[in-house]
Image: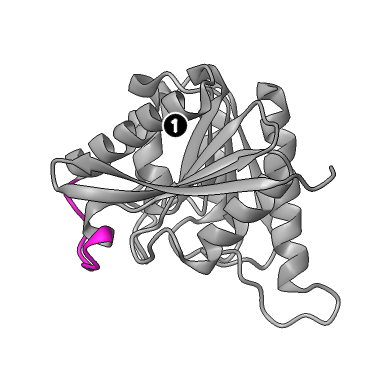
Amino acid sequence: MAAKKIQTTRKKIETEKGSISVCIRRPSSFNVCLIIANGAGAPMDSPFIRHFCDSLAEDGVMTVSFNFPYQEKKRKIPDRQAVLEQTYLSVIDLVARESKLALSHIVIGGKSMGGRIATHIAPRANVGGLVLLGYPLHAVGKPDVVRDEHLYSIHVPCLFVSGDRDSLCTLALMKKVVSKMKRAAIFVVEDGDHSFKIRKNPARTQEHVFADVREQILLFLKKFK
């Protein structure tokens, strides 16, 4: 797909914990928007979030990133889940107004914690689908405590992208969960960790890995066009 001219704007919106930053990347033409929320330990300007938001926008997808309130204040401890959820819902409202897209053409998700919060609000938000990058299915070293019950109430299409070395998502468990969901698929990053980083390999670079992930996201998003 040919690269498109991108208009990037930053906005502030109010939450119960203060204002947060939202970055909108708008191609010259688009008919689907993907919101990518952050993981717990990095803000919206982290290299991982910027890479996927920038590259997908160049491929014709409107992309949106944002900070949760604690990240805006440069704190390390995440807000309560209710605050995280309400913040995400506020961002969806902004995107619907800014993009003029129907909710069915807005896809939400994110990295790790950001993706987890997206799965909790998806039934209330009436969005079109979910893209989950490094979903935290369980805590490190605790694969016996799986965070999966709420996933089975999701009825929209879901794409999970998981590394096979992810310490927060044992691949066999993730595949089992996906098989029980109604409209879910998984793309496995071979030798990838929680952030899809691979060990040194002369035949396969990190750029190749991220390009493969981006291609899978684009294929998934085609169903919303």
Q: Is residue 173 left or right of residue 93?
A: right
- Residue located at (67% from left, 79% from top): 199
Q: Residue furthest left?
A: 16
* Count of numbered badges drawn on the protein: 1
User: On screen, 192 above or below 186?
Assistant: below
User: On screen, 102 above or below 55?
Assistant: above
Q: Quadrant of the N terminus?
A: top right
- Residue located at (70% from left, 23% from top): 223
- Residue located at (70% from left, 32% from top): 29
Q: Which residue is mark 1?
A: 95
Q: Quadrant of residue 152?
A: top left
- Residue located at (86% from left, 76% from top): 203
Closest to the observer, 8 or 116: 8
User: On screen, 122 above or below 199?
Assistant: above
Horizontal and vertical percent position of residue 50: 55, 60
Residue stretch rendered in magenta on the structure = 72-80
Give neighbour class at mark 1: few <14, some 14-19, many 20+ (Cα, 10 Å): many
Colouring scheme, one of rainbow, by chain, secondary structure, one colour: one colour
Residue 149 seen from this side: no
Magenta highlight on residue 178 = no
Closest to the observer, 147 or 212: 212
Main secondary structure of the magenta stretch: loop
Horizontal and vertical percent position of residue 17: 14, 47
Q: Is residue 71 left or right of residue 167?
A: left
Q: Quadrant of the C terminus?
A: top right
Horizontal and vertical percent position of residue 116: 38, 44
Horizontal and vertical percent position of residue 15: 19, 41
What kind of residue is marked 1? Answer: Val
Closest to the observer, 54 or 192: 54
- For label 1, the SS is helix
Residue 70 seen from this side: yes
